[in-house]
Image (cartoon, grey):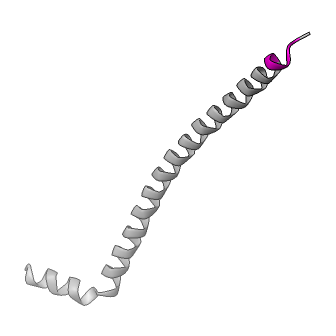
Amino acid sequence: MPSVLGLLEQRELVARERVEALREEVDRVLAERAEAETDWEGWVVARQRVGQVMSAPQAVEAVSEAGQ
């Protein structure tokens, strides 16, 4: 018959392994999230820039006429 301490140690080991696995998963998810946020922010900036350019066509025309 296994000892009480042996059974407790076994359950502790299982719990520790679960915590370690979850920590690894959290690290992976956080890294993936950071990458996704960077991508998202790039699209936000692109949309804002296009919006600025599209809302001020006179300024673009003035620059292109000055370059002629």
**Looking at the image, which residue sits at the far right?**
1
Residue 51 located left or right of residue 17: left
Q: Position of residue 25 (x, y in %)?
A: 60, 39
Q: Residue at x 73, y 27 (%)?
A: 12
**Quadrant of the image occupied by residue 20:** top right
How many marks do you count on the picture?
0
The structure residue drawn at horizontal position 59% and vertical position 38%, both measured from the top left corner, is: 23
Magenta span dominant secondary structure: helix
- The C terminus, quarter of image: bottom left
The residue sitting at the bottom extreme is 58
Q: Is residue 24 magenta?
A: no
Tell me: residue 18, above or below residue 29: above
Question: Looking at this rendering, what residue extends furthest in the top direction?
Answer: 1
User: Height in image: 12 above or below 47?
Assistant: above
Which residue occupies the foreground of this view, 53 or 22?
22
Q: Horizontal placement of 61 versus 67: left or right?
A: right
Please report the bounds of the magenta region as a residue range: 2-6
Q: Position of residue 56 (x, y in %)?
A: 29, 87
Left or right: 18 in relation to 40? right
- Image spot of residue 49 (x, y percent): 33, 74
**Percent position of residue 66, x then y:** 9, 84
In the image, residue 65 above or below residue 18: below
Task: From this view, report whether residue 16 is shown above or below residue 28.
Answer: above
- At x 21%, y 87%, the residue is 59
The image quarter containing residue 63 is bottom left
